[in-house]
Image (tube, rainbow, N blue to C red):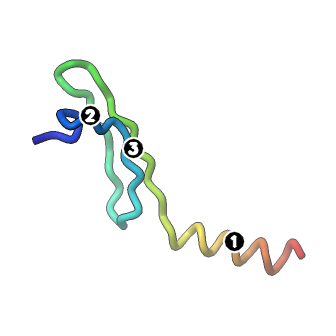
Amino acid sequence: MHLLEYGITGVLNFSPITLKPQRTSSGIIPVVHNINIGLELEQIFYELQFNS
């Protein structure tokens, strides 16, 4: 089963593997937002340290 068959059209991915959306046979391209939590934490620590 594909996620689209269950009505899921968007994914917020926190895993270390980058997911890439692919066009389905019906032409729908699901939304995938990949988040690297390590980089996000690094960015906020940097901003807290140098922008205070």
Going from N to C along the chain, the mark reached first, 1 or 2, is 2
Is 15 above or below relative to 38? above
Looking at the image, the residue that sits furthest to the bottom is 49
User: If you read the primary sequence from the N terminus, does the residue marked by circle 1 or circle 3 appear first?
Assistant: 3
Viewer-proximal residue among 34 and 6? 6
Judging by the rendered image, the residue that carries numbered circle 3 is 32
* Comparing labels 3 and 2, the label whose residue is closer to the camera: 2
Say whether marks 1 and 2 touch (CB < 8 Å): no
Considering the numbered disc 2 on the image, is that residue within a helix, a strand or a loop? loop
Nearest-to-viewer mark from 1 and 2: 2
Which residue is labeled 1 in the image? 44
Q: Position of residue 36 (x, y in %)?
A: 48, 64
Number of residues whose C-alpha sits closer than 10 Å to that of mark 2, classed few (under 14), some (14–19) or many (20 or more): few
Q: Which mark is residue 7?
A: 2
Q: CA distance from mark 1 to mark 3?
A: 23 Å
Compared across the picture, whether 5 is left or right of 40 comes to: left
Residue at 41% across / 62% down in the picture? Answer: 14
Residue at x 73% of width, y 75% of height: 46
Instruction: Please tell me which residue lies in front, 10 or 33.
Output: 10
Asked which secondary structure carries label 3, the reply is: strand
What is the crowding at mark 3: few (fewer than 14 residues within 10 Å), some, or many (at least 20)? some
Counting from the top left corner in percent of width and height, residue 47 is at 77, 71
Local packing at callout 1 (Cα closer than 10 Å; few below 14, some 14-19, many 20+) is few
Residue 51 relative to residue 40: left or right: right
- Callout 2 amino acid: Gly
Residue type (three-letter) at the residue carrying disc 1: Ile
